[in-house]
Structure formats: C-alpha cells, structure tokens
Amino acid sequence: MKTIYKLIFLVLAISFVAAQTAPKYKIGLVFDASGRGDKSFNDSAYEGLLETAQNFKGYIVNDPAAPRHGNEVELKYLTPPNNSNPARLESLRQMGREGYNIVFAVGFLFTETIPVAAKEFPNTNYVLIDGFIPDLAPDSNITIVSFAEHEGSFLVGMIAGMMNQGGKIGFIGGMNFPLIHKFESGFRAGAIYANPNLRQRGQILVEYIGNDASAFNNPERAYQIAQNMYRQGATIIYHAAGGSGMGLFRAAAEAQKWAIGVDADQGAVLAADRNSAIAAQARWILTSMIKRVNRPVLLLSRDLIRNGRITPRYQTFGLNFDAVGFALNDGNRSQLSREITQKITDARVLIRNNQLTVPSTREQLETWISR
C-alpha cells in the first residue's frame, strides 16, 4: 500500500512541477521562403519574437542563441522548406498541431494557405502580415495586418529629393504588383514634394526585377539594374526588393553613390556584418525606410498575453503606430542635416494629422504629379 501512495505522490509531484514550468502561452511565426538572414523583412519579424520574449518572460524554443527571459511564453519560428503553397500550409498546420495560441504568417504568399489552416485549427489565431483576405466573418480566427509603406517611403523620398544635386534618382522594385507599387508611389511623391524639379518625366528611374516571388531573392539582377541606373545619372537609388537589395548595395559601393534600404535599418545591419566586404557597403546606405514588422508581432502578442485572446480584425500599421519611418543612426547622422530631418518631422506631423495625403497607388501618384 505504501508503494502505491508513493507512486501517487510522485505522479502528483511531477504533474505539479510540469504545471509550474509549462508556458502559459505559445506564440509561433512562419517566415516566407527567404527565412531569417535577409537583413530586411524576415529579420524584422524575428525582432518581434525577441522583444516579446524580453517583455513577457519568454524564450524561443528552437533558437538556443536567443536570450531566455523566463518560462511563461514559448515562442517558435519555422521556415517552409521551399517556396510552395503546400510547404507553407504544412508549416502553418504544424504550429496548429503543436497548440500555438497565435501564429504569424510573414508575407503575402500565405494569402491562399492561411484560410485553410485557420479552418482546420479554429482555436489558433492566425495573423497574416502583408496579405489580404476580403470579407472576413466576425467569428473568424484570422487577423489581417497591413502597413502604410507609402508613408514611410514618402519620407525617404523626401531625403532623396533634398540630397539630390541635379541628377536623377531611382527606384528598384522586387515583384511588380500592388504591394510594391505602394513603396514606389510614396517614394516618388516624397521626392517630388521635396524637389519639384523631379516632377519632370525621366528624372525618377523605375524598374522591377520580376513578376513572381523569386524577384525578392535575386541580388544579381538588382545589381545589374542599379549599375544601369547609376550610369544613367542616378545619384540615389531606393529599393523595395527584399533580399535582392543586397545587389543594389554592392553596385552603390562600386559606383560610390547613395542607396536607400528598406524594412530594417540596413545601414546599421550591414555595418555589423562579419564579412568586411559587406560591412564596407554600409557607408553608401544613406538611410532606410523602416518597416517595423516587429511592431505587430509584439503588440498582438501583448494583446494575447494581457487579455487571453486577440480580436480578429483588419489593422494597418503606419506612422500612427510608429511602424514606418526612416533610419537615423551613427553612420548617417552626419549626412542628414538638421534642416533635412526637421522638414521630414514637419511632413510626418502633416501626414499624421491627415493634412497631407500620400498616394499609395500608381493612379493616385499620377494625380499627385499632375497637380
């Protein structure tokens, strides 16, 4: 009999310890096919996981290099093994099977697969970043997150316009579709706003890398486009091309002309790279349009942890959430004068107060240019 009591006590003790150490919440994130290390979009999303762990006593279960801040929140990320819908769907399903409370799907490529996973795992909140699903039902377990990329692009466009000394400026887009048109439209509008001389046709060079997702992972093509633009007289080129942007930075360093990064503070990121050749390219990154993908990851995770749930909805992150902006760091502070930063600050206030409307489509841009 004593042996039975000892076994019961042991089981209860183990159960108690497990209950104390089990995480209260599980938060997952699925990258797009580029995964971590793109020094841009995906890495910014990863920062959101790190911040969530730091702020809410968590740890990233499959990243032993990340600091462990406690056991209350378990975080995990996955990268689909290939750039296909079945691979993306299986990653979303895996998170659902493992009981994650909220799963962030990073990128528009998850648009077709996330409704399938959400239907199969109704107790998991799925968050689609940068995609769009129309007419979500009130009881849906999907949240749609978009960004006002045109607002942040407007600010770096102003920088390009003010820094340009009589030459041309350029824009390199990744995939030629409406999301990247937002970057283009805001950038061109900001440049014209700051420098009316750029209103003339041919003063702003524009080229896209391709028509599918591979355009975001083709640095060699971006390098060729950038070389050509610099030869045509561009003094500054802005890219919205994900991992392809590394090709722009290589061309900028060779031409000793300016480049503008995207999503992360790419000047600071490259400056810290262990590869000395890449680190040297940081000198020619004038600034970056910051798209803080980490913000929705952190803020929606916070909602889950504080409230026990999130409310599915459409949500746009822009200047209102400080989710877009421009990079100002030790490397570029000497280049961006107080006059330039003050003019950008003034424009930011106008945009936030709805006194300045930034075009987000090519049609709206054409109206802007013709005014």
Image (tube, rainbow, N blue to C red):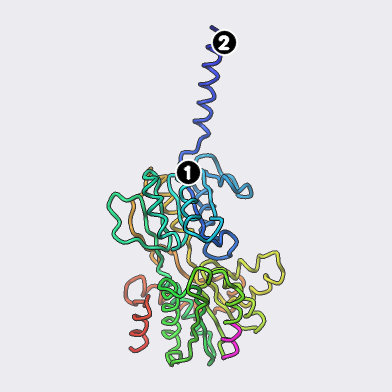
How crowded pointer 2 is (Cα within 10 Å; few <14, some 14-19, many 20+) is rated as few
Q: Where's residue 352, x and y in %?
A: 36, 70
Q: What stretch is highlighted in magenta?
A: 226-232
Q: In which quarter of the image is residue 307?
A: top left
Instruction: Single out the residue that lies furthest toward the top.
Output: 1
Is 223 within the magenta? Answer: no
Can you identify the residue that label 1 sits on? 26
Three-letter amino acid code at disc 2? Answer: Thr
Q: Main secondary structure of the magenta part?
A: helix
- Nearest the eye: 213 or 255: 213
Considering only vertical position in the picture, is 369 above or below 349?
A: below
Q: In which quarter of the image is residue 154?
A: bottom left
Is 229 within the magenta? Answer: yes
- Nearest the eye: 232 or 333: 232
> Residue 140 vs residue 155: left or right?
left
Q: In which quarter of the image is residue 155?
A: bottom left
How crowded pointer 1 is (Cα within 10 Å; few <14, some 14-19, many 20+) is rated as many
What label does residue 3 carry, if any?
2
